[in-house]
Every structure is written in structure tokens, then in C-alpha cells.
Amino acid sequence: MVVLGIESSCDETAAAIVTDDRRILADTIFAQIAEHTPFGGVVPEIAARAHLDHLDDTIAAAMRQAGMKFADLDAVAVTGGPGLIGGVIVGVMMAKAIALAHKKPFIAVNHLEGHALTARLTDDVAFPYLLLLVSGGHCQLLVVEGVGRYQRLGATIDDAAGEAFDKAAKLMGLGFPGGPAVAKAAAGATAPFRNLPRPMKGRPDCNFSFSGLKTALRQRVDALKAEHAFDDATRANLAAGFQAAVVDCLIDRTRHALELAQAAHPTLSALVVAGGVAANQHLREALHKLAAKHGIPIVAPPPRLCTDNAAMIAWAGIERLHAGERSGFDYAPRPRWPL
Ligand code: KG4
Ligand code: ZN
């Protein structure tokens, strides 16, 4: 089975062609960084227009990369939500048009399910597994029991981890997108700030919270600015301290979830991390240590497949098609769609 995947729910215009024997024949991404940088964040209206401008070329590039024509495809999969609705509409309309014109099945996929199942594309992980899903819009711990079978152990009560990185970068004047900017600044730290708070650490549930950490960071930045001490070196130390605090929180909550999941599911196969924040090197290293301590494999897809991409959408489509599903052409794009 060969499936074209389309992703346009945030600020990446992406197309990929993936086979059901787990080969990525093409994977093209147009990142709208230049469009959004002047505004310091993703502007939904600009994102929707940029998807409209670039989706044709991005899909054509994927078809060329795979050396294929639309007639060679077995199906078209697209992100049907959740996400910025203008972009989702652009992707869904395009996918429907290609599928209708070439008489192929069409399947609308949950973007979060794309992230959740990526590890089965890259590493053939068996169900059940524990998933730490950390992106710009979501921060959750789930036991993935099967396709469409997700048991949520915990989630953020305020900001997502990626959102926290993005807001912190803005506060420190590090630019957009925030996660990579904070990580880059942190790499130059000589004496990372140590006493930023670790919200929720040690709590008996598996939830997250980052708004208090963000407030503490803002207070530090304001105080340093008032003392005229907010130079590049201080900024690097603050970035490193912030990154360490976020990673600490993620690891503490994941440790607790892992203990619960291992007790409830003796066949738990792996600890999997997904979503844009999973590209963070410090988090990856800390998760490796955590998994080793608990005697379980860690699966962290390559960073390119952690941030938004269309290969994960094609793959989630394949998993759904294998289960005998397809979407109707009356499918309506969804701004919200919990897993
Ligand atoms: O999954 P994703 O590409 O888009 C959403 O579905 O949200 O995740 C984007 C998020 C952004 O908040 C970005 O700052 C964060 O992932 N991110 C990172 C890194 N790379 C991307 N956060 C920390 N460290 C990184 N290296
Ligand atoms: Zn995403």
C-alpha cells in the first residue's frame, strides 16, 4: 500500500509518500518561518494563506521525489484536525480533490494520532506503549493500547511544553520558533540558573503545569533588566536553567506515569516520545536514562519526524486503512479533536 500524506494544521506545509512496509519514499516540508518571524509567533490567517500558496508545489515535489504519479497511489491521508482551522481546511480540500479526481480512498487523520503512531513507522513498536506527547499545543502522557485506543494518564493543566518554550524564548528575546532558540542559547551557558521552580514535581497524578515556571522566568528577566544585567551571557544561563526545569518536570511526571503503566500493563513494550519538543536533545538524553533505570526500551523518532511532518500522517492513515476505515467526502475539518 502506498499512501500520500498531507499536513497543514499549523505552520508546516508538508507532503509525504509512505508504504505500509514502513518505507518513506518522499518527505517534503515547507516551513513558514519567514512568514511568521516578524510577528514572533504563528499568525493563523497568514498560515492559512501560506498553505494555499505552497501546498501544490510541496505535493508536486513529494511526487517527484518518489518518482510517482497520483495514479500510483492507493489512498490519500490528510490531517483532519485538531489545528488552526484555515490550514486544516486547505489540506482537507486538497486531499479530497486529489482522491476524487483519481478515484482513490480518502482518510482524515487526527494530527495527534500521527505523532502517537510515528514510533511504529520508525521502530515497529508493539502495543501497548507509554507515550509522552509534547508539542506546541499538547502535553500528555498516554498508554497507546492500539490504533484509536488511548488511555490518558495525565495532561497539562495550563500551557503545553512547546508553548512554554515558545513563550520563554519571546520573554528572553530569543526569537521564533522558541524551542530550538532556547536550546541553542542554552548550549552557550557557563553557569545555568538553578533555582527556577519545578511545578507539579512529586504530585501523585500525572499532570503538568508550566505557567508558574513562565511567571518565575518573567520575574527574573524583569529584575535582571532593571539591574541592566540582562546580557548575552546571562540570557544563555537563564535559557539553560529554563530548559533544565522543563526537562526535570517532564521527567518527573513521566517517571510516575511509567511506574503506573508498567504495573497496569505487564507487556508494556516501550517508552515513546513524540511531538516537536521530542527534538530536544536534553530531554532525549534524560528519557534514555529514565527508561534504562526502569528496564524498558526508549523510542525517540529522529527529530525531523518528531516535529510536524506528513510522513506521520500518511502512516496513521495506513494504520487506519488497514483497520478497514476510510472517510467520506463530506468529512468536515475539526479545530478540536481530542485523542
Ligand atoms: O509537533 P510540533 O512541530 O507542532 C505542534 O503540533 O505543536 O511542535 C512544535 C513545538 C514548538 O513549540 C517548538 O518550540 C517545539 O515544538 N520544539 C522544541 C524543539 N524543537 C521544536 N522544543 C524544545 N527543544 C527543541 N529542540
Ligand atoms: Zn504536531
Image (cartoon, rainbow, N blue to C red):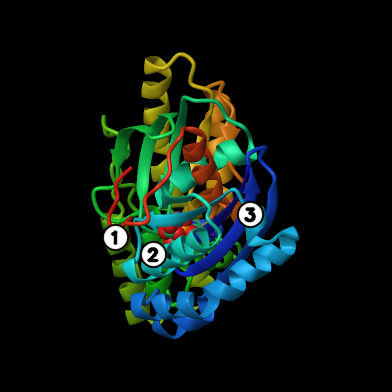
Question: Which residue is rendered at x = 58% and y = 41% of the image?
Answer: 300
Between the residue at mark 1 and the residue at mark 3, the CA separation in whole angstroms equals 25 Å
Kind of residue sitting beneath label 1: Pro
Q: Looking at the figure, which quarter contains the N terminus? A: top right
Secondary structure, mark 2, is helix
The residue nearer to you, when weighing 286 against 271, is 271
Towards the viewer: 169 or 221: 169
Badge 1 marks a residue whose secondary structure is loop
Q: Earlier in the sequence, mark 1 or mark 3?
A: 3
Q: The C terminus is located in which quarter?
A: top left
Tag 3: residue type?
Ile
- The residue tagged with tag 3: helix, strand or loop? strand
Q: Residue 298 placed where, x, y %? A: 57, 33
User: What residue is drawn where x is 37% and y is 37%?
Assistant: 141
Cβ of disc 1 within 8 Å of ligand 1?
no
User: Who comes first in sequence, dot 3 or dot 2?
Assistant: 3
Tell me, yes or no, if residue 11 can be seen here: yes
Q: Which mark is residue 17?
A: 3
| Residue 287 position within the rendered picture, expressed as x and y whole percent measured from the top left | 53, 38
Q: Is residue 332 left or right of residue 10?
A: left
Q: Position of residue 209 (x, y in %)?
A: 28, 49
| Mark 1 nearby-residue class (10 Å; few <14, some 14–19, many ≥20) | some
Which label sits on residue 335?
1
Which of 288/106 is in front? 106
